[in-house]
């Protein structure tokens, strides 16, 4: 028979606090001298849901688009397929979502897809907007933008104001009868390293909840979009697909991992 376990917890509570506080101080010192990378929790909320608008470029606009986004040396545009079975295409994606953790509030990110220096397909953030002051490796400290993202009676209404010019507005009707999408694993794996235009990237870690997430493909008749941003001249007015995540997601992110 095993010896009886003592129920007293006071000493163990003190030991836990002391031991893990010392580990945190050690990590802080190693981060300060560049020997360790920080890891931050990043939680995308389930309500209002995260939604992706994936747009095809207009015919003949690829070269002009690539010149406009002015990628860092060693990076190039990469075709991407978001759904299994479709042909990969050069895409411009707008993701609007709400987040909590080290960053909080509504965010809107215009992204495309690139090949990194090893030839692997990755996300590339072209423009990131937040409804609170934010930090990114391109602009450093940025002001809050006018963003809205809310549910009202089965309608998801969003407003994303561009820091450069114009605004994007959408109304998307949501219900559980809309079809579940078969997400291509390559689209998810592109999140492993999320690049910014100057070549700095965030590294992300996620678990099976992302691969197994329920994602719905919203039919065109349930979507209304008005795009007056500087991106509108490059993309077709109707998105290739609009994808809505049914639940929340959690990540661990190492920001600016390659510097």
Image (tube, rainbow, N blue to C red):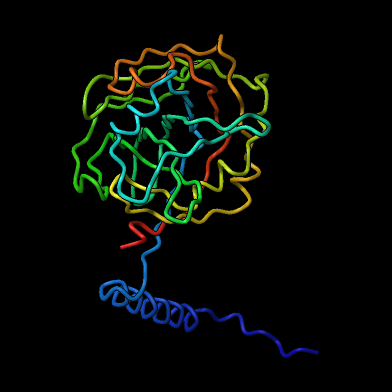
- From the top left corner, tell me how far across and down residue 29 is, in percent: 28, 77
Image side of residue 141 versus residue 57, left or right: left
User: What residue do we see at 68% from left, 19% from top?
Assistant: 177
- From the top left corner, tell me how far across and down residue 137 is, in percent: 26, 50
Image side of residue 191 versus residue 66, left or right: right
Vertically, is 72 above or below 243? Answer: below
- From the top left corner, tell me how far across and down residue 35 is, in percent: 33, 76
- Number of on-image labels: 0
User: What residue do we see at 19% from left, 46% from top?
Assistant: 141
Quick one: which residue is furthest to the right in this view? 1
Quick one: which residue is furthest to the top in this view? 221
User: What residue do we see at 30% from left, 15% from top?
Assistant: 228
Query: As rendered, which of 245 and 243 lies closer to the eye?
Result: 243
- From the top left corner, tell me how far across and down residue 82 is, in percent: 57, 34
Query: As rendered, which of 57 and 60 lies closer to the eye?
Result: 60
Quarter of the figure with the N terminus? bottom right
Vertically, is 66 above or below 41? Answer: above
Quarter of the figure with the C terminus? bottom left
Q: Quadrant of residue 71?
A: top left
């Amino acid at each position: 028979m095993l010896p009886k376990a003592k129920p007293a917890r006071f000493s163990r509570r003190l030991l836990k606090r002391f031991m893990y506080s010392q580990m945190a101080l050690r990590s802080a010192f190693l981060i300060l001298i560049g020997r360790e990378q920080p890891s931050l929790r990043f939680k995308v909320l389930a309500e209002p849901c995260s939604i992706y608008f994936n747009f095809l470029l207009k015919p003949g606009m690829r070269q002009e688009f690539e010149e406009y986004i002015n990628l860092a040396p060693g990076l190039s545009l990469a075709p991407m397929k978001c759904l299994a079975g479709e042909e990969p295409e050069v895409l411009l994606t707008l993701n609007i979502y709400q987040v909590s953790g080290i960053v909080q509030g509504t965010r809107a990110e215009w992204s495309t897809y690139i090949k990194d220096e090893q030839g692997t397909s990755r996300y590339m953030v072209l423009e990131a907007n937040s409804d609170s002051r934010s930090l990114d490796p391109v602009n450093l400290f940025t002001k809050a933008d006018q963003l809205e993202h809310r549910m009202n009676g089965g309608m998801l209404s969003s407003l994303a104001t561009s820091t450069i010019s114009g605004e994007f507005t959408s109304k998307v009707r949501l219900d559980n009868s809309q079809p579940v999408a078969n997400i291509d694993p390559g689209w998810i794996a592109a999140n492993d390293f999320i690049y910014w235009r100057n070549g700095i990237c965030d590294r992300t870690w996620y678990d099976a909840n992302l691969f197994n997430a329920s994602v719905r493909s919203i039919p065109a008749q349930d979507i209304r979009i008005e795009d007056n941003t500087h991106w509108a001249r490059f993309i077709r007015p109707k998105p290739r697909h609009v994808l809505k995540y049914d639940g929340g997601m959690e990540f661990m992110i190492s920001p600016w991992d390659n510097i």
